Amino acid sequence: MIGSMCTVLKCIETLGVSYIRASESYNKKLEAEFRKLRFPYRVSSEEKLDEYEIRRKDHISHFILRLAYCQSEDLRRWFIQQELEVFRFRFNELHNKQLEFLKHNKLEYQAIETKEKEDVKMKLADSGGHSLVKIDEWLFYKVPFTDALELVRVRKVFVKNGFAYIPHPEIVIIVLNEFRQRLSKSLAIASRSLPVVQSDERLQPLLNHLSHAYVGQNYSVQKNVGKISLEQIDSLAVKSYPPCMRQLHKAIRDNHHLRHGGRMQYGLFLKGIGLTLEQALHFWKSEFIRGKVEPDKFDKLYAYNIRHSFGKEGKRTDYTPFSCMKIILSNPPSQGDYHGCPFRHSDLELLKQKLQAYKIPPTGIAQILDLVKGMHYQLACQKYFELTHNIDEVGFSLTHPNQYFNESQKLLNSSRDIKKESNQPDNSQWNQGSQATRGVSTSASKPMSQVLSSDMDGLEELLSEGYM
């Protein structure tokens, strides 16, 4: 059951990048996956013995995963994000039992009186795009606007005197905020138990395997190390960089300096695409010297941090490039910064101008901006990939800037191979090669699920000895 729950969380991450979250197509696909995995996402009218057992294992697996994913900030962030989507889907499946759920969990919200609703009726209709008939039918809750920032940001609720008027169909947003706070606190508490967990040589390896197997590739292993030359970077930035890294590259070339957040984000990305430590030191030093930083000052203030990111100083930690989620959710840029996600952190008009400078057609810009307005930032980046590579569909779920780079290079190199093979009478080798490329992710993921299946059996058996 733990393995199934892990698979559910990874499936949610993939679907969240491939589809608009909470859309009809997203919900249908997610429900199909839940059914396939026999995941208990819906409350039955009659509790059956086998359903009770499934739910019991679901609860146990959740708390085991808390131990696995409380071990670092990135793991906690990933786990919370996926669990929020599980909760959202399950809550919406309660339908007419939602009020009962809220009452049971002491999450009762006071609905506004009929008179107050009549007074602001037209405002409610205008702000949320709801019909007057629906407004008459629904309960509305008045909550501090800070509890409904997700709805306020997209202008889907009426706000007055610091309070947001939330229609009952949107109450899930408020409940999600409460769930996020509770889960975050619980993970912090679980992390305090790590010294005890880590002392058990049987338990810790399994928990580590769980956490590392399902958050995706971290790109710390440089497959192309030494194969990228510094002379190629300007060309690669235009052809194969995601907008976040293209923005940082332009900033360092224009200003010959980046603040700490930009140096970390871009430096680790460069490390991930294959730059060696020596190349990285040369790249940053040459740019900073052009920015009037003396060589000795660079060696004293900046070189240490670069060597540190490669695991050559300090604790010798081999730092990994930032994922899309980390860039989107942590360390937002301030004035004078260039790091972050352009789709998440840029003003819409500035983003539009940037996309125009990248020669994105007007229709494509409109599509990207619509996704950004809906807070679908990774989907916006995937659309950018499609438009800049002239393809109809990316064929992968984008979760990492280095993944973007690798997929771009794979596609561009495949195009070159096609052109070469088109001049030859026999193109069977290309057909075989392209099939092998398309099959990489599938063939690579199958052994992992087999390994996890046996590991999960061992973990459940181990925990049944008295750890729960």
Image: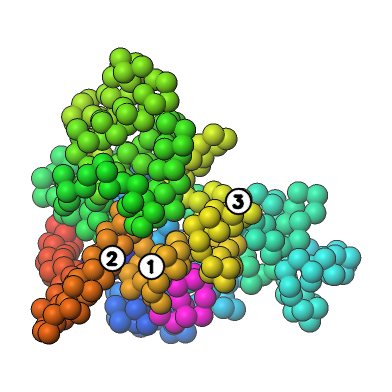
Q: Secondary structure at mark 1?
A: helix
Q: Quadrant of residue 149?
A: bottom right
Q: Identify the magenta region.
A: 18-29
Residue occupying the point 15% across, 39% down = 199
Give the residue type at disc 3.
Leu
Residue located beneath label 2 in the image:
412
- Asked whether the residues under the numbered discs 3 and 2 touch, taking CB atoms below 8 Å apart as contact, a structural biologist would say no
Residue 389, numbered circle: 1
Kindly identify the residue that appears in the image at 35 percent across and 67 percent down: 397
Q: Looking at the rendering, in which quadrant would you find the N terminus?
A: bottom left
Q: Residue at x 31, y 65 (%)?
A: 10
The answer to which quarter of the image holds residue 267 is top left
Distance CA(mark 2)–CA(mark 1): 8 Å
Measured Cα–Cα span from mark 3 to mark 1: 23 Å
Asked whether the residues under the numbered discs 2 and 1 touch, taking CB atoms below 8 Å apart as contact, a structural biologist would say yes
Q: Position of residue 7 (x, y in %)?
A: 28, 68
Give whichever of 456, 402 is nearer the camera. 402
Three-letter amino acid code at the position of disc 2: Leu
User: On the image, numbered disc 3 is attached to which residue?
Assistant: 350
Quarter of the C terminus within the rendering: bottom left
The span from disc 3 to disc 2 (Cα, nearest Å) is 29 Å
Looking at the rendered structure, the kind of residue marked 1 is His
Dot 3 or dot 1, earlier in sequence: 3
Any part of residue 298 in sight: yes
Q: Position of residue 96 (x, y in %)?
A: 59, 78
Q: Magenta segment: does it hold 395?
A: no
Q: Residues within 10 Å of mark 2 (few under 14, many from 20)?
A: some
Q: Is residue 78 above or below residue 35?
A: above
In this orientation, which residue lies closer to the viewer: 298 or 370? 298
Q: Position of residue 88 (x, y in %)?
A: 49, 67
Task: Give me the residue at 21% from left, 58% from top.
Answer: 213
